[in-house]
Amino acid sequence: MRHNTAQMACATSRWTFHFTPTSASWLNAVEGFFAKLIRRRLNRGVFRSLVDLQVAISRFLADTNSTPKPFVWTADPNRVLAAVKRGKEALESIH
C-alpha cells in the first residue's frame, strides 16, 4: 500500500511539515551558501577537534565576506504574491 506525504504526517506526531513556497529565493540563497561551505571547505577537511572545525568555518566566512556579492532580486513581485496566495488557498482547503 502506498502512502503519500500527507497520510504519513497524519499517521505520526514525530514529524511536522512546513510549507515553503518554491518562490522562496532567500531560502535558495541560504541553501546555496551552506552547499558552498560544505563543498569548498568541509568535505575533504580533517578536523581533530570542534575548535578546528569552528576555525575552518570562521576562515571560510572571513574569506567569503572579503569579496561580498549582494543578492539581487530578480523575481516579479506580482508573481511571488500570486504564488503565496495560491499556497495559502491550497493549505486552507486541506484544513
Image (spheres, helix red, strand yellow):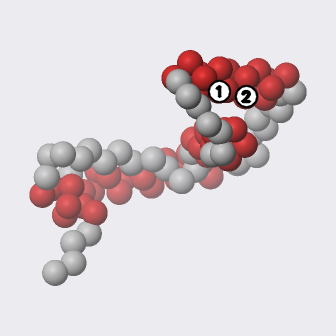
**Residue 12 on image: x %, y %:** 13, 52
Give the Cα distance between marks 1 and 2: 5 Å
**Circle 1 is placed at which residue position?**
57
**Residue 51 on image: x %, y %:** 56, 18
* Amino acid type assigned to the residue bearing label 2 in the image: Phe
Asked whether the beta carbons under mark 1 and mark 2 sit within 8 Å of each other, the answer is yes
- Give above or below for 49 relative to 27: above
**Residue 79 on image: x %, y %:** 62, 52
Answer with left or right where residue 45 lies relative to residue 93: right
Answer with left or right where residue 82 lies relative to residue 76: left
**Residue 83 on image: x %, y %:** 52, 53
Answer with left or right where residue 2 lies relative to residue 83: left
* Amino acid type assigned to the residue bearing label 1 in the image: Ile
| Nearer-the-camera pick, 38 or 1 | 38
Q: Which residue corresponds to the image point at 53% horizontal and 24% vertical from the top-left? A: 49
- The residue lying furthest to the front in this view is 48
Q: Which residue corresponds to the image point at 65% horizontal and 39% vertical from the top-left? A: 45
- Give above or below for 36 relative to 7: above
Q: Which residue corresponds to the image point at 73% horizontal and 23% vertical from the top-left? A: 59
Question: Can you see residue 50?
Answer: yes
Q: Quadrant of the N terminus?
A: bottom left
**Circle 2 is placed at which residue position?**
60
Q: Which mark is residue 84?
A: none
Bin the neighbour count of mark 2 within 10 Å (Cα to Cα): few under 14, some 14-19, many 20 and up: some
